[in-house]
Amino acid sequence: MKLILTIILFLILPYTLADAKKPQPRLILTIIPTNPTVNSIVPLGTVIAKAVASWSNGASFTGTIGFVSPYSNDNDFFTLVGNNIVTNNDISMLGGTIQFITLQATQ
């Protein structure tokens, strides 16, 4: 059976009132592939997708990416290893389901 992982993204940007007059660069969090599908019988540590954060103006992203509410890491079924979203538990019982995680990029 296939498992579909849906990723919800949150971005936190530094912002001050003085910055309101100039166009603000946007922090972009991209998941590759966008809507990953994986077989439910995979080894622990299998890479499901990659999270890539970047700035719309081309500036380097030097912040962090992590799990946050409401779905976080789906009850510890997934974890981040570097920027890779990987399986962190046996997901065989999740076959035929859609799982949700929530990621946030913070700079």
Image: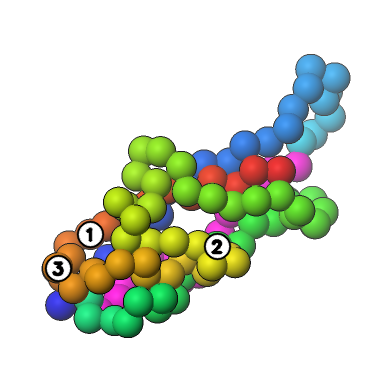
- Front tag of 2 and 3: 3
Element assignment for label 1? strand
Q: Is residue 86 above or below residue 30?
A: below
Q: Is residue 73 above or below residue 11?
A: below
For disc 2, the marked residue is 51
Q: CA distance from mark 1 to mark 3?
A: 12 Å
Q: CA distance from mark 2 to mark 3?
A: 25 Å
31 is within the stretch colored magenta: yes
Most frequent secondary structure within the magenta stretch: strand
Q: Amino acid at mark 3?
A: Met
Q: Is residue 50 visible?
A: no
Residue ID at (37%, 69%): 87
Is 73 displayed left or right of 95 in the figure? right
Q: Residues within 10 Å of mark 1 (few under 14, many from 20)?
A: few
Element assignment for label 3? helix
Q: Amino acid at mark 1?
A: Ile
- Depth check, front residue: 68 or 2: 68
The disc, 2 or 3, on the residue closer to the chain's N-terminal end is 2
- Depth check, front residue: 35 or 45: 45
Is 67 displayed left or right of 12 in the figure? left
The disc, 1 or 2, on the residue closer to the chain's N-terminal end is 2
* Mark 1 in CB contact with mark 2 (< 8 angstroms): no
- Front tag of 1 and 3: 3
Is 105 displayed left or right of 100 in the figure? right
Boundaries of the magenta span: 25-39
Q: Which numbered marker is on residue 98?
A: 1
105 is within the stretch colored magenta: no
For disc 3, the marked residue is 93
Q: Amino acid at mark 2?
A: Ala
Figure disc tally = 3
Q: Position of residue 70 (x, y in %)?
A: 36, 38
Q: Position of residue 35 (x, y in %)?
A: 38, 65
